[in-house]
Image (tube, grey):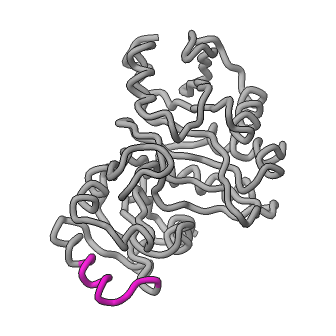
Amino acid sequence: MSLFDYALMKLIVVSRNDTASLNISKNLLNLREWEDAGEFSGNPLRKSGDFLMATINDEHLSHDGLDRELQESTDIEPEVMIFASRHKSASGLRSFTVHTPGNFSKAEMGGRSGELVPSSPHYKTNALRNLKELAKNMDHTVSYEATHHGPYLETPAFYIEIGSDETCWVEEEAGRVIAEAILSIDQEKDPVAIGIGGGHYAPRHTDVALKNRLCFGHIIANYALESITEEMLAKAIDRTPDAEYVYFHRKAMKKPQYRELKAWFEDHGLQAVSQKDIPSRL
């Protein structure tokens, strides 16, 4: 296989230090035939169709520069990196989540302070929609999360996760659903937006992406807006490929803040849209 072919691959990253990741990996291996594609980080590198699967020995979120390390050791530069991972929350509720890595302020869980990873809005949104369909008979919630934590990368990437505690991470059906959602991902053709406002689980942005023809790149929750700088807003645009729009969770924001941010994004070339402006998918 040529390096050009490898550039079109989707790389799934599995962590040996993550029980949900290992659960997903087991299901990926069972759902497809995989062939040997060499070695990375002392572990087998596997290939199936246009997917590669690499295993690391540490936590996903702490492995900054994984894409550069991969390139230096294997010459592989994937189109997108997909982190098969656990999601942890105090609620312990069953969930499936997707999000882009990055830190709008201080890096408290990996990555670099004030640095964002390039988002993959079309693949990430397709993964969200796949999860919603695959989990329709399960008691799991399905949602985006706002941009947060590491690792720092220069390659487009997103997390796809099983939540939210130790009992959920190892459930066979949950691992299979994530694996199927990954293996069926495709590039959505919908326009791209940056999401602003609301809670960490981005309820309005999730609802819009599931019901309407809009894909979201970086999503900035209310708590991140408290200390956001214009530099970081500009990075959110730069790290959201093909961004044309900005969508605000207006009811979750104070009116002066909404008006100020709307004007700023419009001055920087993004059009503010509401759900009624966006064609339905249903």
Res 138 → quadrant = bottom right
Q: Main secondary structure of the magenta part?
A: helix
Q: Is residue 105 above or below residue 208?
A: above
Q: Position of residue 224 (x, y in %)?
A: 40, 67
Q: Position of residue 74 (x, y in %)?
A: 45, 13
Give the number of marks.
0
Q: Position of residue 274 (x, y in %)?
A: 39, 79
Residue at 25 percent of width and 65 percent of height: 229
Q: Is residue 11 magenta?
A: no
Residue situated in front as seen by the camera: 232 or 49:
232
Res 154 → quadrant = top left
Q: Is residue 225 above or below residue 142?
A: below
Residue at 36 percent of width and 71 percent of height: 225
Residue at 73 percent of width and 26 percent of height: 29
Quarter of the figure with the C terminus:
bottom right
Residue at 52 percent of width and 73 percent of height: 199
Q: Is residue 257 magenta?
A: yes
Q: Position of residue 232 (x, y in %)?
A: 28, 59
Q: Residue furthest bottom?
A: 255
| Residue 160 horizontal side relative to residue 278, left or right | right
Q: Residue furthest left?
A: 267
| Residue 114 horizontal side relative to residue 5, left or right | left
Residue situated in front as seen by the camera: 167 or 208:
167
Residue situated in front as seen by the camera: 35 or 26:
26
Q: Is residue 10 above or below residue 240?
A: above
Res 175 → quadrant = top right
| Residue 61 horizontal side relative to residue 164, left or right | left
The segment highlighted magenta reads 252-262
